[in-house]
Amino acid sequence: MSSSSGNEKQRDNKEQILGLAEEKLDVSRETVIDRTITVKRMTAENQSVINLTLSHQKVDITHVPVNKPVGKVPDIREENGVIIVPVVEEEVEVIRRLILREEVHIRRIEEQVHHEESVPVRKQYVEIHKEDDES
């Protein structure tokens, strides 16, 4: 160790070691209230007269019976300022009609054929007897 302490002495003579100092700055903000402001909202109400022209519409609805057959649903139409909305209803129609499916034709044909056969024939008759009183 004595040799190492001798080296330090030599080093002390030639060089000097200085420790460096470093400064650090820490900056921060702080809010400082020096006065207070209050905002208040209020509503005032006044009476005012207004003069306006208002318009409105009324409708008059009339049901008009038609009762006629149509081939298809009619479109909605307008005639003389009147909007016409057709209302349709399906009806089942039952029709009774005669349909000639066939005819049966009957024709008389007369023919003469000779025929012979033995058949019993019955016949009644009356027999009357009279008795005389003289007997």
Image: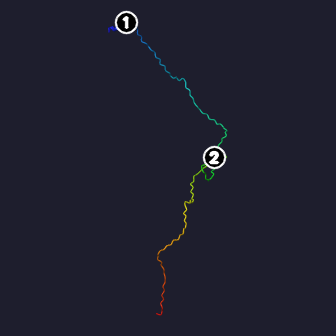
Question: Is 98 rendered above or below residue 48?
Answer: below
Residue, far front: 114
**Viewed as shown, does residue 61 lie left or right of 133?**
right
Which residue is at the far left? 1
Q: Residue at x 35, y 7 (%)?
A: 7
> Which residue in the structure is indicated by mark 1?
10
Q: Where is residue 47 in the image (x, y as percent from the top left)?
A: 64, 36
> Residue drawn at (63%, 46%), measured in percent from left and top?
77
**Towards the viewer: 68 or 49:** 68
Near mark 2 (Cα within 10 A), the count class, few <14, some 14-19 or many ≥20, is: few
Residue at the spot of label 2: 77
Instruction: Tell me: residue 29, above or below residue 66.
Output: above
Pointer 1 local density, CA inside 10 Å: few below 14, some 14–19, many at least 20: few
N-term mark: 2 or 1: 1
Badge 1 marks a residue whose secondary structure is: helix
Query: Label 1 near label 2: C-beta < 8 Å?
Result: no
Cα distance between the residues tagged 2 and 1:
122 Å
Q: How many labels does the image show?
A: 2
Nearer to the camera, 72 or 120: 120
For label 2, the SS is strand
What amino acid is at disc 1? Gln
* Residue 95 on image: x %, y %: 57, 57
- Expressed as whole percent of the image width and height from the top left, the position of residue 52 reads 67, 39
Residue 73 placement, left or right of 119: right
> Relative to the observer, which residue lies in front, 69 or 134?
134
Three-letter residue code for mark 2: Arg
Q: In which quarter of the image is the N terminus?
A: top left
